[in-house]
Amino acid sequence: MDDATAGPNADVQALSYEQARDELVAVVGRLESGAESLEESLALWERGEALAARCQQWLDGARDRLAAARGETARDEAGDDA
Amino acid sequence: MSEWAADERGGPGDVRAGDARAGDAGAGVAAGAGGAAAGAGAAAGAGALEGAPVPGGTGGRLPLPVKAADTTPDRPWPVRHLAPKIADYVQRMPPVWIEGQVLDLKRWNSMCFLTLRDTDVDMSISVTTSAGNVARLGKGVGDGAHLVVHARPTYHLKRGSLSFAADDVRLVGLGELLERIEHLRRVLGSEGLFDESRKRPLPFLPAVVGLVCAQQGDAEHDVVSNARARWPAVRFEIRRVTVQGPRAVPEVSAAIAELDANPRVEVIVVARGGGSFEDLLPFSNETLVRAAAACRTPLVSAIGHHLDAPLLDLVADLRASTPTDAAKRIVPDVAEERARIAQARLRSRGALVQRLQREQTALDHWRSRPVLAQPSTLVDAHESRVHALRDSARRTLGHLLDRASTEVRGLAGHVRALSPAATLDRGYAVVQRADGLVVRDPAEVKAGDALRVRVARGELAAQVVDR
């Protein structure tokens, strides 16, 4: 897949998770309606991919932070029990 | 003056109010008198203040001073002169209804002696009445019982003591007590003593816990053991007082004030185990409730069982249903706190993980949708549409072509039918003049004209020789 950050979908990076997810749902809806022109469908598809990637980034980031936090608490708990 | 003669009056039991006879009505002295014989003092005479001659003479000395103010160390009044005056003076006091709590009730023959103590303050008077009066009240009369008596003060000349001869003794019933408490509650409520705004929060970890409880009894044990179980380092300042009967109010109030004054004490618990309505009366007593209200240190009221609600509960900063409950309220359970923190941490993490999973599945769901997963489906859609169009285009073209070709064939047939070729095949030839005119009449040509002769398989040139 091409790099979504450059090109027309660069704005996706600035979107919040909820915004990205909601727009993704809208894009899928429009694509599935099939009313778009070919060029429009392709552009929509690319944007869909960019949005999905952004959402995934958010989720992965959240999971990393949680793991990091859990890492600390694991140490704390170890500390508590000592 | 004569009726003053001391005589042994009729049955002692029927003393009536307003008995005009002066002197020693009824006999005996209250409070621990034991078997002291009643006996009317032999006082007589001296009712009047003037210096009436006193029987038994003055022993030949100067006449007695007329007024007490005139007495001097060397011209004093003998007791026998003073006592009747006091008795007479006391005699003039009207009978009065008095309220108080019974203390040391004793029966002797047909008489009853008791001390009537004030409900709030440490003052009491001795009262004598007929045993019948007391018996009539049933067995409810015992130490601590709440009484209202109608009595006349009497002065006993022999012993110089004042007691009250009661001719009507009534038990202050439960209903009346309740009414009194209700009235007091309204009064204190209107003064704002029960307002929420006055309630002070309890310290989370009190340095020292002040405890007011009974000399013995499980209230103290309940509070201390439960508090220690929750927080072993808790320290107590215990004041053991009487928590029942007339002495309760002053002692509990004093204990509260003392603990309040102690700066290290950061919370005060007033604890008392269950008891009858009368037992808990002191904790609805105005003096005690006001003392609790005045207390600046946060105060916990743990009186009786959870159903009892003395006024102290309303004025306290926290009402605990039982002493054990009070212990749970004043110190945190350290182990429980730790467990609660750990649980909070677990639950918050669990909630977050669950949220992440939910979002992930939603995202996966969207990404798996065909339009995203296989974008080719988009193109396929268009492609199939294009193919369909193309196919239909071809088809229509095919049809057109067919039609056209049949048309052409038809035309070709015509052309061929119209064309001389078939005739040429049959041997005919088409002669054309140079200018292309097909010669149909020899006249159209002349000798020597060049002619074009088209035969089936070709053409040749010819010349007219002769027509």
Image (cartoon, coloured by chain):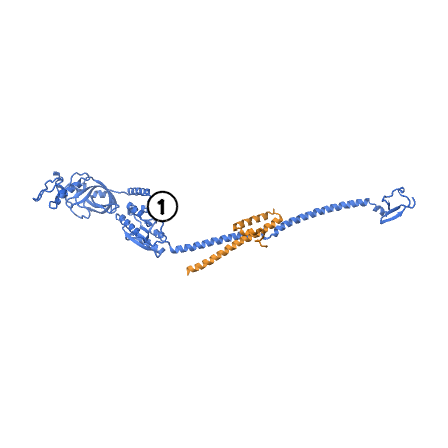
Q: Nearer the viewer, residue B2 or A19?
A: A19
Please identify the residue farthest to the left as the structure is shown. B60
- Quadrant where the N terminus of chain B sits is top left
Image position, residue B189 (x, y; %): 33, 43
State the residue at coordinates (39%, 56%): B335
User: Circle 1 sits on which residue?
Assistant: B197
- Quadrant where the C terminus of chain B sits is top right
Image position, residue B281 (x, y; %): 29, 46
How dense is the environment of label 1, judged by Cα within 10 Å: few (below 14), some, or many (20 and up)? few
Q: Nearer the viewer, residue B19 or B9?
A: B19
Image position, residue B255 (x, y; %): 28, 51
Image position, residue B162 (x, y; %): 18, 44
Please identify the residue farthest to the bottom as the structure is shown. A82
Q: Colour of chain A?
A: orange
Q: Taking B371 as reference, is B36 left or right? A: left
Q: Taking B80 as reference, is B97 left or right? A: right
Residue B365 appears in the rendering: no
State the residue at coordinates (45%, 55%): B346
Q: Quadrant of residue B150?
A: top left
Q: In the picture shown, does residue A70 fall above or below B178? A: below
Q: Nearer the viewer, residue B287 or B280?
A: B287
Q: In the picture shown, does residue A80 fall above or below B380? A: below
Q: Colour of chain B?
A: blue
Q: Chain of mark 1?
A: B
Amino acid at pointer 1: Ser
